[in-house]
Image: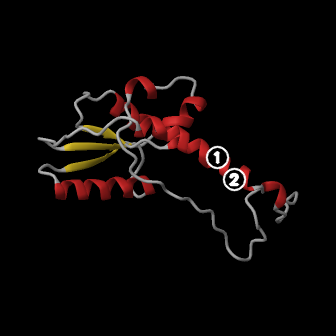
Amino acid sequence: MRLAARLLPALFLCLLALPVAAPRAQDWAPDRPVRIILPFPPGGATDLVARILAERASRDLPHKWVVENRSGANGNIGMEAAAKSRPDGYTLGACTIGNCAINASVYARMPYDIERDLVPVFWSASVINLLAVHPSVPARSFCASSWIGPRPTRGG
């Protein structure tokens, strides 16, 4: 694969992040607990990042930060709760590419409008996913056309 073809998606993602970085930071110190609504069940990468953030913020700030898991509908339930919460800065929603970009193309009706109902505040983490198989599997690529594996047989 040519270098340009590899760099184009990364450049596109960087351009998408520019509007997030544009606003200037404001001084803010919470005077009551802060909720992080996580639209996924406990135990995943997003949950881990949110819990580390909450623990460190709770340690450094006068009030606790609490992670609230609200999973379901591919993240739409939790993001709807974040979008419909009081806009006072005490509720954060954990936005991923799925629930904040892809879902709007997948679902006919969304319970929130990502551009109207939510405002990006900060980038918390990038998570790298990895697909792994047992060494005996002959796969050398994720591309289905390049993998020649066992073929299903009729009748069992």
Residue matched to label 1? 9
* Amino acid type of the residue tagged 2 in the rendering: Arg
Residue 17 picture location, percent across and down: 48, 41
* Quadrant of the rendered image containing residue 105: top right
Q: Are marks 2 and 1 in contact (CB under 8 Å)?
A: yes
Q: Residue at x 37, y 56 (%)?
A: 49
Q: Residue furthest bottom?
A: 136
Task: Work out whether 123 lies above or below 143.
Answer: above
Q: Between residue 39 and residue 18, name the one nearer to us.
A: 18
Indicate the quadrant containing the N terminus: top left, top right, bottom left or bottom right: bottom right
Q: Residue at x 43, y 41 (%)?
A: 95
Residue 142 is tagged as none
How is the protein colored in the picture? Answer: secondary structure
Give the tally of numbered discs: 2
Residue matched to label 2? 6
Mark 1: secondary structure: helix
Task: Work out whether 95 lies above or below 146.
Answer: above
Pointer 2: residues within 10 angstroms few (<14), some, or many (20+)?
few
Mark 2: secondary structure: helix
Indicate the quadrant containing the C terminus: top left, top right, bottom left or bottom right: bottom right
Residue 39 picture location, percent across and down: 40, 42
Residue 79 picture location, percent across and down: 40, 35
Is residue 126 in view? yes
* Quadrant of the rendered image containing residue 90: top left
Is residue 73 in view? no
Residue 80 vs residue 90: left or right?
Answer: right
Q: CA distance from mark 2 to mark 1?
A: 7 Å
* Amino acid type of the residue tagged 1 in the rendering: Pro
* Quadrant of the rendered image containing residue 154: bottom right
Residue 17 vs residue 91: left or right?
Answer: right
Q: Residue at x 32, y 27 (%)?
A: 84
